[in-house]
Amino acid sequence: MSAHLSAIDLLKLGDEDRKKPFLNQIWPYVIGVPFGIGSGIMMNFGTRRPIFSGIQKHILGVAGWCALLNYVQNKRNEYFAEKDAVYRHYVELHPEDFPIPERKKLADVFEPWVPIR
């Protein structure tokens, strides 16, 4: 990464290169499977049946929860993509509000340390 990047360069940085986090890709299934099985168990518990009877309820519950959470993830991605597009557009229209920051050394940021004994 170069030292002096403008704001628009920072917003565009890594769009192609950025890897999606592993948990972002699997969280609908990590949450959907236990919730689907749990919903089948709760339905059976509510009707006073053995908790794993009617395995189709558990399978449909897992499929339903995973589908719902995938839909939520897609809507979330669309929301953040639109939000990023609005930010990029604003920065492109108002570059004077986003000057390139001057580079500072760490010694300029920290105050001198004086030990108190």
Image (cartoon, grey):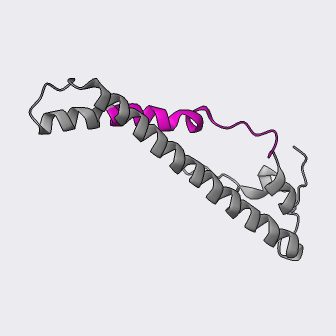
Q: Quadrant of the N terminus?
A: top right
Residue 108 magenta-drawn? Answer: no
Q: Residue at x 91, y 54 (%)?
A: 4
Left or right: where does residue 103 sit relative to residue 34?
right
Q: Is residue 107 left or right of residue 49?
A: right
Dominant SS type (magenta): helix
Q: In the depicted view, which residue is nearer to us: 92 or 102? A: 92
- How many callouts does the rendering have? 0
| Residue at screen point 18% across, 26% down | 51
Task: Tell me the residue at 76%/63% (across/down).
Answer: 85
- Foreground pick, 105 / 60: 60
Chain part drawn in magenta: 15-36
Residue 88: percent from the left, percent from the top? Answer: 80, 64
Residue 23 appears in the rendering: yes
x and y percent of residue 99 in the render? 87, 69
- The answer, for residue 117, to whether it is visible in the render is no
**Relative to 104, residue 94 above or below:** below
Q: Position of residue 84 (x, y in %)?
A: 72, 60
